[in-house]
Amino acid sequence: MKLLARARELEAQGCSVVHMEIGEPDFATPQPVTDAGIRALQQGETHYTPAAGLPELREAIARHYRDWFGVTIDAGRILITPGASGALQLILAVLVDPGSQVLMADPGYPCNRNFVHLYGGEPIMIPVGPEQGYQLSADVLEQHWTGRTRGVMLASPSNPTGTVVCGDTMQAMLDFIRQRKGSLIVDEIYQNLCYQGKPQTALALGEDMFVINSFSKYFGMTGWRLGWLVAPAASIEHLDTLAQNLFLAASTPAQHAALAAFETPAREILEQRRQEFQRRRDYLLPALRAIGFGIPVEPQGAFYLYADCSRFTGDSFVFTTALLEEAGVAITPGIDFGNYKAGRHVRFAYTTSMEKLQLGVERLEKFIKAKT
Ligand SMILES: Cc1ncc(COP(=O)(O)O)c(C=O)c1O
């Protein structure tokens, strides 16, 4: 966020900046979705919905799981939240007591550890590298599980690495967590931004887990602040009560707009955008490797490339700052995502046009040549 603020400052001074630091799609919300939101406002849909969300939207999400993944979910297990962020806060409020530990991958989504701290818990950041696809596994969980461990958080595809947890690994982790009577939290916010094979949901493996999703990324609705969670039936009442207290309900016009996101006109636009993200990944990945960045695992999803920059620097924070100031390219230093080899890594987001990506690569190449 600081880097983005500095990039905007430079732009205000007339400098040109290629933005490869932004974790949201550059596309606007699909028009049919926006139109549905406008119609809802015009029809006076401006009052609170139930805390758990509009019943029609909960049903639409249940149908989405059935039609896309062949998984039957009772709509009563789905809660609509202000973004995946709202879902994460609710779930951790239910699971975390002061002193409890939650296991998560390092590198990983930065807010997770902060949410655990917020409820007095202790995030246990487990180093993960390319040899394990930057994801946790049952063996690793066993090594870090203690009497205070309450659960495990993972994201598939992950931010910042774009790697997914394969079905067998997820099953083995779930089996282990069941044995220990812990909770599994799976963040599937990048689920439909998958470029290899069909997208998967952990919900295919059982009902005893918390799954988070959002309209932000694939659906292109970051600013509408809308997400959802699927929880075990026994937790729904607690989560609902917490939602009533914490935020009363998610945005009403946003929920009406989101209904259109599951209809064919929006789906066609979203599919084209997914293909465009894939085209960008397929350009940027070899281009960065050719310059000398290490990207040992091909990311299967999301819109990020997590790259080893140790050929050029031992301090990725200094590197990204100089790159922005001297070459007008904004990327994110590894320190944002954890501690493990953070100084040797940076994240590239391909949330900008192909032309801009090409310009970014040109500038990056020049910058590196001048330094080495
Ligand atoms: C892995 C992950 N989870 C959750 C979020 C929060 O998303 P939102 O609250 O916009 O749905 C993000 C946003 O970048 C993310 O990358």
Image: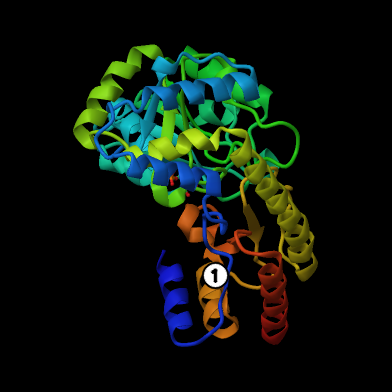
The residue at 40%/42% (across/down) is 39
Residue at position x 52%, y 61% in the image? 22
Q: What secondary structure is found at the residue carrying circle 1?
A: loop
Disc 1 target residue: 315
Q: Percent x, y for residue 367? A: 66, 82
Q: Position of residue 254 (x, y in %)?
A: 39, 41
Image coordinates for residue 226, horizontal then vertical, percent: 40, 40
Q: Is mark 1 within 8 Å of ligand 1?
A: no
Q: Kindly identify the amino acid type of the residue bearing the numbered disc 1.
A: Asp
Q: Is residue 254 left or right of residue 142?
A: left
Residue at image coords 65%, 66%: 310
Residue 82 appears in the rendering: no
Residue 212 is left or right of residue 271, and the answer is left
Q: Of all residues shown, which one is farthest toward the left? A: 245
Above or below for 224 versus 14: above
Which residue shows up at 50% across the image and 69% down it? 317
x, y (%) of residue 149? 38, 27
Residue in the foreground of this view, choosing between 175 and 76? 76
Along the viewing direction, whichever of 224 and 231 lies nearer the viewer: 224
